[in-house]
Amino acid sequence: DRLTHDQSYKFSSGTSVNDRVEKELLYPCMFGKCVKRIANWNVAARQKHPNSRILCSKINFKPAYRQVHLNHKVTLQTCTQLPDEDIAMMSLRLTFGEGPGPFEWGVVSETVADLANAILHDDNWDPITLKAESRKLVPKRKEPEAETPLAQAKELAIDMPVDPR
């Protein structure tokens, strides 16, 4: 499994799997700016709500990333040969060293984020009355001490909307 992760390695053919990726044919990779967007949103939210606690959550998507299956054409392109061992290996799922991985993952993660935002902003969805059965699996949130001082926000160079939902 780990051998297929490093798809930039050049075997005796002189090329790697990543060398053969035509990135201009892939969907744009948008999630790379996520940390900056969240940081800007936090500052804008602090400006709008200077006396409120702003809670955030970090989610590890590694297990979900490893469950995304490649389509058959990409799977064939990930084939790695070990001639000395008479073995050919290919990955059926996204790997972390794969050139198209971030682009393929972007399609999945952006769809999930768009769906979550659509549900969040749907007036028919009420998180107080509509509860998922799996909510008991979500860990309790950890809030800072009430005495912890809140920082003051500085001015942003951009306009960042802050929706109360």
Image: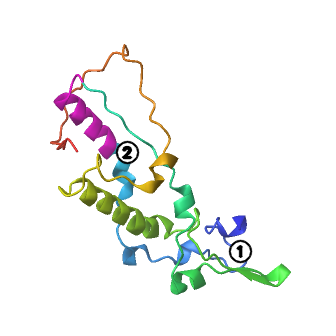
Query: Disc 2 and disc 1: Cα gap in Å?
Result: 36 Å
Report helix, strand or loop for mark 1: loop
Q: Nearer the viewer, residue 25 or 36?
A: 36
* Residue under pointer 2: 35
Q: Position of residue 96 (x, y in %)?
A: 57, 62
Q: Position of residue 85 (x, y in %)?
A: 84, 80
Report helix, strand or loop for mark 2: helix
- Residue drawn at the location 36% of the way across and 50% of the way down: 34
- Residue drawn at the location 17% of the way across and 44% of the way down: 161
Q: Which residues are drawn in magenta?
A: 37-51
Q: In the drawing, what numbered circle is on residue 11?
A: 1
Q: Crowding at label 2, few (<14), some or many (≥20) Cα neighbours within 10 Å?
A: few
- Residue drawn at the location 25% of the way across and 26% of the way down: 52
Residue 98 visible (yes or no): yes
Q: Nearer the viewer, residue 101 or 162?
A: 162
The N terminus appears in which quarter of the rendering?
A: bottom right
Hey, which quadrant is residue 14 in on the image?
bottom right
In this view, the mark in front (2 or 1) = 2
Report the side of 130 relative to 154 (left or right): right
Q: Is 52 above or below relative to 40?
A: above
Hey, which quadrant is residue 41 in on the image?
top left
Report the side of 48 relative to 67 (left or right): left
Q: Nearer the viewer, residue 142 or 97?
A: 142
Predominant secondary structure, magenta span: helix
Tell me the amino acid under the disc marked 2: Val
Tell me the amino acid under the disc marked 1: Phe
